[in-house]
Image: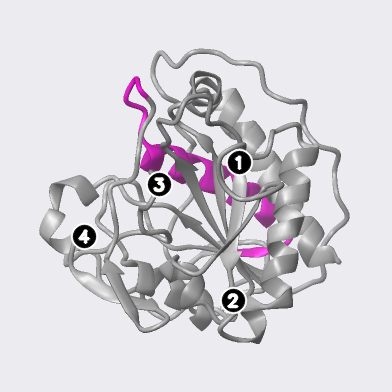
């Protein structure tokens, strides 16, 4: 996600507000998506990525995770819809969504987040966790940031994790960081969200990925300006997986191997948080 862009993503007339979730069997992915085979970027450069993380213990039964892949592939074609103002929390409004960023070679953030979210979903579902995704595909418009937050709230999610990537042009900018709402606006934005953000930070760092050298501190970034976090009434955090304008990180994000490794460490970190 480019610096300054609204998080928890986009919306439009074509994508109606999601219907209420129907009861489902634990360990399935439900509500707003199916699970197509992950796609890889054509001709993407290969890169060196860390080895897979060790397996983790199973979380407690009945857990629900909402995954929010940032942006959407149709946003750029509907500027009037994604630029409309929606509630952003703390008495403010923001555009419904943004188009996101991309690597210098044109691999988009929305494609990266969609692919990684599918992989995280599959890994968590295999552990018996019910997974809900905030968008159905990578060709639509939206949903808006406030609607994405509402999906997690309505599902009474045990964890809401938004997946993004950054687009800083600062020289040498690299590394991941995890944002959470601060100061908190409700109890779930307090200790539960801080613990989720820390679990994600610890898990991604343990998987071999470096923390950001240009945003946050030690991989954590308390924020008051992110609509999806401000509007959440569930434990919520946002992962900026790295800087798409950094050549090494762009290569990892553009490769299937790299996306699988991002997904593996994120899924493990979520499962560890739920099992605690």
Q: Is residue 66 left or right of residue 271?
A: left
Residue visible at 72% across and 50% down? 201
- Residue 127 appears in the figure: no
Name the one closer to the observer, 149 or 177. Answer: 177
Query: Label 3 crowding class (10 Å Cα cut-off): few <14, some 14-19, many 20+?
Result: few
Q: Residues within 10 Å of mark 2 (few under 14, many from 20)?
A: few
> Which quadrant of the figure contains the C terminus?
bottom right
Tell me the magenta residue range: 104-131
Q: Is residue 128 magenta?
A: yes
Q: Mark 4 Cα within 10 Å, few/some/many (few <14, many 20+)?
A: many
Question: Is residue 228 shown left or right of residue 91?
Answer: right
Q: Whole-percent x and y of residue 188?
A: 65, 81
Alpha carbon distance from label 1 to label 4: 26 Å
Q: CA distance from mark 3 to mark 1?
A: 13 Å
Colour approach in the figure: one colour
| Mark 1 neighbour class, 10 Å CA radius: few under 14, some 14 to 19, many 20 or more | many
Could you tell me how far apart the alpha carbons at marks 3 and 2 are, in whole angstroms?
20 Å
Identify the element where label 4 is drawn.
Answer: helix
**What residue is disc 3 on?**
3
Specify which label sits upstream in the sequence, 1 or 4: 4
Q: Which residue is mark 2?
A: 183
Q: Which residue is mark 4?
A: 82
Q: Where is 242 relative to 61, above or below?
A: above
Q: In the rendered image of this protein, does residue 104 appear above or below residue 136?
A: above
Report the Cα–Cα distance between label 2 and label 4. 27 Å
* Of residues 202 and 66, the one drawn nearer to the viewer in this rendering: 202
Q: Residue 176: which numbered mark, if any?
A: 1
Mark whose residue sits in front, 1 or 2: 2
Observer-nearest residue: 235 or 260? 235
**Is residue 242 visible in this depiction of the protein?**
yes
Q: Residue at x 62, y 39 (%)?
A: 212
């Amino acid at each position: 996600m480019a610096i300054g862009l609204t998080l928890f993503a986009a919306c439009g007339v074509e994508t109606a507000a999601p219907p209420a979730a129907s009861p489902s069997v634990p360990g399935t992915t439900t509500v707003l998506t199916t699970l197509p085979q992950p796609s890889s970027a054509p001709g993407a450069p290969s890169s060196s990525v860390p080895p897979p993380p060790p397996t983790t213990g199973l979380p407690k039964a009945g857990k629900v995770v909402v995954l929010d892949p940032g942006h959407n592939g149709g946003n750029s074609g509907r500027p009037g819809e994604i630029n409309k103002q929606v509630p952003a929390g703390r008495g403010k409004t923001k555009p419904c969504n943004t188009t996101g960023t991309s690597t210098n070679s044109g691999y988009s953030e929305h494609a990266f987040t969609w692919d990684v979210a599918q992989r995280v979903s599959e890994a968590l579902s295999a552990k018996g966790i019910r997974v809900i995704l905030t968008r159905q595909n990578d060709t639509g418009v939206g949903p808006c940031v406030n609607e994405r937050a509402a999906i997690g709230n309505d599902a009474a999610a045990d964890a809401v994790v938004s997946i993004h990537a950054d687009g800083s042009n600062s020289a040498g900018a690299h590394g991941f960081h995890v944002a959470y709402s601060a100061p908190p606006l409700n109890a779930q934005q307090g200790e539960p969200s801080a613990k989720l953000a820390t679990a994600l930070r610890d898990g991604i760092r343990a998987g071999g990925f470096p923390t950001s050298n240009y945003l946050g501190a030690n991989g954590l970034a308390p924020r008051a300006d992110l609509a999806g976090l401000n509007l959440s009434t569930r434990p919520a955090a946002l992962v900026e997986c790295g800087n798409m304008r950094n050549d090494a990180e762009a290569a990892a994000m553009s490769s299937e191997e790299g996306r699988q490794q991002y997904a593996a460490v994120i899924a493990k970190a979520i499962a560890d948080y739920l099992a605690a």
